[in-house]
């Protein structure tokens, strides 16, 4: 796991409808409960989730020698001391933190300081610890100034090095804040440089619309409605195809409560990952699948996408097929949202699979998938571009 890491400070709000959480009014005092302190960011959320699923994982990130940096390391040591071995502690910088404002029934808001993530570079990657590693995941370049300020040269170099070392490479994004330099960066150029070195690209639909189709994103963002519910299936398919054309092997779009969409290239070029069999390549190539979410009681959504990614990576490491991997991913994401923090609800893979096998109910997609085929046994939709439906 490589990339963005921070400390999350998450105050617990009272239940929806009580006066203290009904409105976030400027100038008012809002009484909250205890605060939860946990590590956050892609490195922490995806890495810890993988660790709790049962994967042998190493974290690569950067903190400072200040209080928040020490807190980050202490929180990781409390889970497993091995998780701190790849974390660089710089001198005299500011560590990253996020204040997560997450009232019940209202979409969460983040107050974020990028800190040492802005100065992270390839020199901070503990490549010596990667010997024998099968997978390299990088997360949140839009929240790391060095990964986009040079039009993506640093980012593409890190991804290329990981691929040259024989690892499957996956990449996750993040939504830049309004008015930030990251929001106005040339993301099409950055993706053009980076995606040829990415096997599994796992952004959210909202992030990709902002980066690739800004006009449509701004039109939909102004409606105030859930963006994933407004985007047509055809637009999702076109977006995935355009990302595949930039060079990645597969696109996995996180769609919030609408589930997970995957489109893979006709020929998966994963020759650098020599532990994968020709049969695996054949099973995964030229696929189009949509996995609905599992029904659950939502306590908080912070880090749910990161945990979904962890479930997907774990399925890849187990050499599972695409259907089982997709279902495992949304199941891990469902375990995540049942708790306030990202990873406190994540259980071993076997426990999660037992719940899936018990007949765990799915959420409806809330849209028609014309031309798609419902596969009853895996509980997943196969699209018109899926080779098994042709």
Image (cartoon, rainbow, N blue to C red):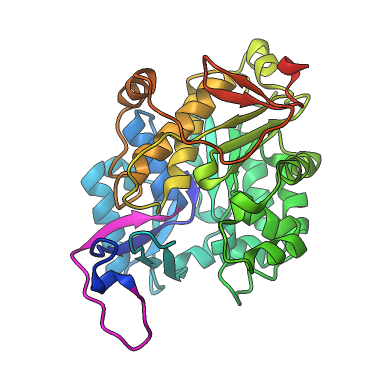
Residue 258 appears in the figure: yes
Compared to residue 145, the image places residue 383 above or below, namely above
Give the magenta part as a residue range. Answer: 23-41
Q: Is residue 342 left or right of residue 122?
A: left
Image side of residue 307 versus residue 167, left or right: left
Which secondary structure class fits the magenta region best?
A: loop
Hey, which residue is sitting farthest bottom in the picture?
Answer: 27
Residue 127 position in % (x across, y down): 51, 42
Is residue 60 shown to the viewer in this render? Answer: no
Q: Position of residue 315 (x, y in %)?
A: 49, 25
Which quadrant of the rendered structure holds the C terminus?
top right
181, above or below 154, in the image: below
Q: Residue at x 73, y 23 (%)?
A: 386
Please tell me whether residue 26 belongs to the stretch shown in magenta: yes
Q: Residue at x 69, y 61 (%)?
A: 217
Residue beneath the point at 49% across and 48% down:
2
Foreground residue among 295 and 168: 295
- Tally the marks: 0
Residue visible at 59% across and 73% down in the picture? 178
Residue 314 colored magenta? no
The answer to whether 239 appears left or right of 144 in the picture is right
């Amino acid at each position: 796991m490589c990339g963005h890491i921070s400390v999350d400070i998450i105050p617990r709000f009272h239940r929806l409808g009580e006066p203290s959480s009904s409105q976030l009014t400027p100038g008012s005092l809002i009484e909250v409960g205890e605060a939860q302190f946990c590590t956050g960011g892609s490195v922490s959320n995806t890495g810890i989730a993988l660790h709790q699923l049962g994967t042998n994982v190493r974290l690569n990130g950067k903190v400072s020698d200040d209080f928040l940096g020490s807190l980050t390391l202490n929180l990781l040591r409390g889970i497993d001391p091995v998780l701190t071995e790849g974390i660089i502690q710089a001198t005299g910088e500011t560590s990253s933190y996020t204040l997560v404002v997450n009232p019940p029934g209202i979409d969460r808001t983040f107050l974020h300081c990028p800190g040492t993530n802005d100065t992270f570079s390839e020199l901070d990657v503990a490549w010596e610890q990667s010997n024998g590693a099968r997978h390299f995941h990088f997360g949140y370049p839009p929240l790391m100034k060095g990964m986009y300020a040079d039009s993506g040269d640093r980012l593409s170099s890190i991804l290329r090095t990981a691929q040259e070392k024989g690892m499957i490479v996956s990449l996750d994004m993040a939504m830049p804040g309004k008015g930030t330099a990251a929001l106005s960066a040339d993301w099409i150029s950055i993706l053009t440089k980076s995606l040829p070195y990415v096997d599994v690209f796992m952004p959210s639909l909202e992030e990709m619309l902002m980066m690739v189709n800004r006009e449509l994103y701004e039109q939909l963002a102004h409606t105030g409605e859930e963006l994933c519910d407004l985007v047509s299936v055809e637009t999702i398919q076109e977006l995935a195809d355009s990302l595949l054309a930039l060079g990645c092997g597969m696109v996995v779009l996180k769609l919030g409560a609408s589930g997970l969409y995957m489109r893979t290239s006709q020929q998966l070029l994963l020759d650098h990952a020599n532990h994968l069999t020709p049969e695996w390549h054949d099973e995964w190539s030229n696929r189009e699948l949509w996995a609905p979410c599992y029904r659950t009681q939502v306590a908080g959504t912070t880090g749910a996408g990161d945990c979904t990614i962890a479930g997907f990576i774990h399925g890849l490491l187990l050499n599972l097929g695409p259907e089982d991997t997709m279902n495992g991913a949304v199941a891990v994401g469902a375990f995540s949202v049942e708790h306030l923090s990202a990873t406190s609800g994540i259980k071993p893979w076997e426990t999660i699979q037992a719940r899936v096998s018990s007949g765990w109910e799915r959420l409806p997609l809330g849209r028609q998938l014309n031309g798609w085929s419902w596969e009853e046994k895996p509980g997943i939709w196969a699209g018109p571009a899926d080779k098994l439906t042709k």
